[in-house]
Image: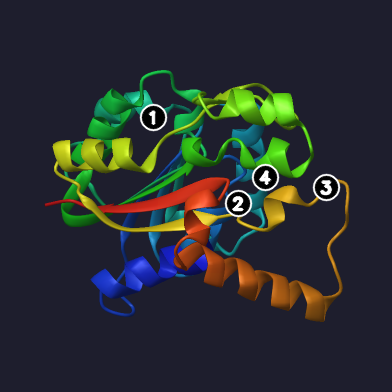
Amino acid sequence: MARQLDEQIGARYPVGQRLRILDVGMGRGTQALRLARAGHTVTGLESDPEMLGAVREALATEPAGIRERFRTIEADGRETGVHFLPGSFDVVLCHGVLMYVDEPDAVLAGLARMLAPGGLLSLLVRNADALAMRPGLAGDWPGALAAFDSDTDAGGPGPRVRADRLETLTATLAGIAAPLHEWYGVRVFTESVPPDRGLPAADELERLLAAEDRAGRTEPYRRVAALLHLCGVRG
């Protein structure tokens, strides 16, 4: 997914331009730190104190220049209007967050307001149109049949999470003046790999990642991905 995000940023901004980036629900800060190392000014919002502490610990080991352009705030995506003025950012990331939000439209509208004109909104969501894939491939036919009419992912470890449909999010993004510009599938093939299986050898891993990247950009494979990566552009 990092490659997809870099492509979208590179298509919109000159090489070397330092961007103002907001990462909402940054988790352990993988994307945020990567973008700060690339020279951008990053603000990370995270409501989980444990994860926020892990990010701050990791940040403490970075060079001074990176620490100076990385700001962390304990907050969630519903509080952007409290902390920032409209148009404060060139790029807003919201990856793996909407699945925990019961009514995402208000959150999305708030995120879109944070974007400067022409800014990029990057979303990573659970794909509701592919919820039957994992139980079906595992031979769990009752689970697969139930998933066809569901918008909740009950499979796998962890709590049940909400899922989104591409058609619905496309309409929502148009309605908040950040219409869909491009979208990708994420975890097309790897979703069926048992989580306890270790990484393959380097050459096999390279082929796997190449196949995943190709599938995430190609019809009809991207439509059955476990996750969707949507990129909207602020009008």
Quadrant assignment, res 102 = top left
The three-letter code of the residue at mark 1 reads Gly
Q: Closer to us: mark 2 or mark 3? A: 3
Q: Which mark is residue 59?
A: 2
Looking at the picture, how far across and down is residue 24, in whole percent?
A: 43, 39
**Pointer 2 with pointer 4, Cβ within 8 A:** yes
In the figure, 183 relative to 195: above or below? below
The three-letter code of the residue at mark 2 reads Leu
Number of residues whose C-alpha sits closer than 10 Å to that of mark 2, classed few (under 14), some (14–19) or many (20 or more)? some
Q: Which residue in the structure is indicated by mark 3?
A: 194
Instruction: Report, in whole angstroms, how far the alpha carbon at label 3 lies from the one at label 4.
Output: 31 Å
Number of residues whose C-alpha sits closer than 10 Å to that of mark 4, classed few (under 14), some (14–19) or many (20 or more)? few
Lateral position of residue 33 relative to residue 176, left or right: right
Residue 153 appears anywhere in the view: no
Q: Which mark is residue 77?
A: 1
Q: Which residue in the structure is indicated by mark 4?
A: 57
Number of residues whose C-alpha sits closer than 10 Å to that of mark 3, classed few (under 14), some (14–19) or many (20 or more)? few
The three-letter code of the residue at mark 4 reads Glu
